[in-house]
Amino acid sequence: MARVHNFNAGPAGLPLPALERAQREMIDFEGTGMSIMEHSHRGKAYDAVHAEAISLIRELCGVPESYYVLFLQGGASLQFAQVPMNFLPQGKSADYILTGGWSEKAYQEAQRVGTARIAATTEVDKRFARIPRQDELKIDAGAAYVHMTSNNTLFGTQWHYQPDVGSVPLVADMSSDFMWKKFDVTKFDLVYAGAQKNIGPSGVVVVLAKKSFVDGARKDIPTILRYGTHATNNSLYNTPPTFGIYLIRNVLAHTKETGGLDAMEKHNRKKGDLLYSAIDEDADFYRAPVEKGSRSYMNVVFRLPTEELEKAFISAAAKENMVGLAGHRSTGGVRASIYNAVSFASVERLVDFMKAFRKKA
């Protein structure tokens, strides 16, 4: 079977070795006579996988013991509500930095729970073409927390500096660029990320949370929505998505084997630089609507002279086994999501196609 060049924005491609490992172990996991999907989440076989996945996250991301590593469900969309439910008490307000559609949704959910304010926004004419500068961040020193979204999948922007929010707890949605490179976990009080972009299949959310932050959260909310519940029970309060966590283990084991996050960053920057160079070299035909200092290395968005040409481009690319290149339905255009598992060869193939399409147009 010929594998396609997968540029989907999520669920996205997974490393072939991780999938092949799952294929080998699908029917009989480590001689147990059944699949990992059939094992009890309380049993020794699954417990070893669960522990290894957590250990790999700690190792690869440098997560200290003062932080919990949690596996939750409900996607980032549930986190939009769960964060304020836990950390936004009555009489307090939370700050939100708006850089795209997902940060807007997080802000809207916080407003339903309590009081939230916009600390900065880069929206102009319903588009977000850049990340705000530090001097544009109007942080309330008394805020319960500041929420940011590290990468904007819709509009193709990404934070390339660490925002200074003073002593206010910082919460980050890293769903679309988690583990694309190393980052200092201790700069954040809580990080959450849907697995389906860089580290696994859909259905699992990874949460890295400072223990003192979680321990001080509200207790007057439903038990299953409290981070403390999942921390106390090692993410086994209820039945977790065991196969999804197993695949995360596979992906992270492969990441470690291939050099860890330092190697991953070099890989990702090489891909992104190649693709952006191809766009900029033919700027009268391909146009990146994002300021250079804010360009995402995960989601490369660009436009062609007309919508008709964009549709033709996407259709012709699909015939060449390049899938997932249509921009988000709310933005249009072309979007190449070049997450960790996307090979340099796939990006080279896309660049060659872009040059050939330009000549024919």
Image: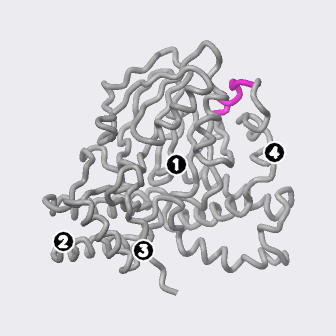
Is residue 212 shown in magenta?
yes
Question: In which quarter of the view is residue 298 placed?
Answer: bottom left
Callout 3 secondary element: strand
Question: In which quarter of the view is residue 277 placed?
Answer: bottom left
Q: Earlier in the sequence, mark 2 or mark 4?
A: 4
- Look at the numbered discs 4 and 3 and tell me whether their residues touch, using CB distance below 8 Å: no
The residue singled out by tag 3 in the image is 5
Q: Is the residue marked by circle 3 packed among few (<14), some (14-19), or many (20+) residues within 10 Å?
A: many
Amino acid on which the number 4 mark rests in the picture: Tyr
Q: Which mark is residue 175?
A: 1
Q: Earlier in the sequence, mark 1 or mark 3?
A: 3
Q: Point out residue 66 in the picture as x, y percentages from the top left corner.
A: 65, 36
Instruction: Looking at the picture, tell me which residue is in the foreground, 56 or 32.
Output: 32
C-alpha distance separating marks 1 and 2: 33 Å
The residue singled out by tag 4 in the image is 237
Q: Quadrant of the C terminus?
A: bottom left
Viewer-side label of 4, 3: 3
Q: Earlier in the sequence, mark 3 or mark 2?
A: 3
Q: Earlier in the sequence, mark 1 or mark 2?
A: 1
C-alpha distance separating marks 1 and 3: 22 Å
Amino acid on which the number 3 mark rests in the picture: His
The residue stretch that appears in magenta: 210-219
Whether residue 263 sits left or right of residue 130 in the image: it is: right
- Look at the numbered discs 1 and 2 and tell me whether their residues touch, using CB distance below 8 Å: no
C-alpha distance separating marks 2 and 4: 55 Å
Q: Earlier in the sequence, mark 4 or mark 1?
A: 1
Amino acid on which the number 1 mark rests in the picture: Ser
C-alpha distance separating marks 4 and 1: 23 Å
The residue singled out by tag 2 in the image is 358
